[in-house]
Image (cartoon, helix red, strand yellow):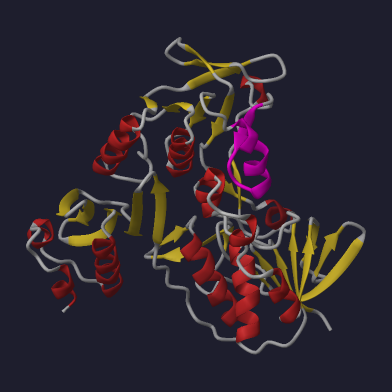
Amino acid sequence: MPGIVIVGAGQAGASLAARLRSLGYTGPITMIGEETTPPYQRPPLSKAYLLGEMELERLYLRAPSFWQEQDVTLRLGQRVTAIDPAARTVTVGDETISYADLALTTGSQPRRLPAAIGGDLGGVYTVRTLADVDAMAAEFRRGARVLIIGGGYIGLEAAAVAAKLGLDVTLVEMAPRILQRVAAPETSDHFRKIHTAHGVTILEGTGLERLVGEGRVTAARLTDGRELPADFVIVGVGITPDTRLAEAAGLTIDNGIATDETGRTSDPHIWAAGDCASFPHDGRRLRLESVGNAIDQAETVAENILGAARPYKARPWFWSDQYDVKLQIAGLNTGYDRIVTRHDGEGVSFWYYAGGTLLAVDAMNAPRAYMIGKRLIEMGRSPDPAAIADPETNLKALLG
């Protein structure tokens, strides 16, 4: 009997499979992943794992025995090469596997530098998979010169690890400021100061012209004419949804694999969740790159495959660890026109407003501000900005 096939063995795929079983589904579940490692957490790769503070086993989302106990067939180190929606099959190598329903949790791929500007030289790395991080681990020698391209969260987290391990760190960001795409100038300023205090050289408004080297990178030529020596390079210039299989199968693509509010794609028997999927949200189409979304969306899809017909309601949250600073983000800041700053002891938080509406909160070592801000956003409440800015205000009282 054809069962449910899940393509992609990351956070979303693992969450979907586990939820199907917890809901009482007893049919076959097959999860197919290109990596050889059982489903694991990605966020610690650029943080604790790269720093050497987290063992491989602690990365696993579930003990490897869990999948056997739950009768989930894991096919690791294998790649689905085609989907036939009419026949309801997927192709893996020379084998064809039938499905009743198919879930695409294919995640995303890191953007790479073009080979024409040295992107294929040795010593140039991205941070996406366990294999990526294991490959670069030997480069992290005290005093080594690392160039990090991209001032988003991945680049800044890698810079923090490298600085803590005693490397000579330079980060270049083409935009006028780090975190420009995702955060307010106040958050950018906060992290710039922290990194500078730890010896990281940050060059903003500076692009990469090309990497230089014979076979292996030895330097980088920047758009301002400078040439920086580099022992290795980490590229953190964003990710793109992995829609290759979906496109080839004729599914609708719109900023990822387009789904309806239940997670169903343009084919009635194919679903999508996680980084690869976009969904309707407040009158527009949204795609979120976060653990929280991967879990919640995948679990909703599991319920809907089994007939729940429940719309997915995103509750965005994100986090980043850099040095001894924990950044927690609630909400989406798109369209903000005002930032309200709140100081809580050692912590600080920036509250994003559009007119009188609270949209999002960036909280640095301010867990209470994050938790209450998240609750307020989910409840649709927008406190008086003056109350937020007043350190005497009891935030919990704002929940009513």
Residue 15 position in % (x across, y down) = 59, 71
As for residue 94 lying within the magenta part, the answer is: no
**Count of numbered tags:** 0
Q: Quadrant of the N terminus?
A: bottom right
Q: Is residue 272 visible?
A: no
* Stretch of the chain drawn in magenta: 123-139
Indicate left or right for 395 with 309 as reference. Answer: left
Q: Is residue 228 above or below residue 18?
A: above
Identity of the residue drawn at 69% across and 25% down: 122
Q: Residue furthest right?
A: 94
User: 238 or 335, which lies in front?
Assistant: 238
Identity of the residue drawn at 60% across and 66% down: 61
Q: Is residue 149 visible?
A: yes
Residue 280 position in % (x across, y down) = 46, 65
Image-quadrant location for residue 11: bottom right
Indicate left or right for 398 with 11 as reference. Answer: left
Residue 370 position in % (x across, y down) = 28, 62
Residue 398 position in % (x across, y down) = 15, 72
Indicate left or right for 81 with 181 as reference. Answer: right
Q: Is residue 91 above or below residue 97?
A: above
Q: Quadrant of the C terminus?
A: bottom left
User: 19 or 50, which lies in front?
Assistant: 50
Q: Is residue 136 above or below residue 43?
A: above
Q: Is residue 71 above or below residue 62?
A: below
User: 266 or 191, which lies in front?
Assistant: 191
Image-quadrant location for residue 137: top right
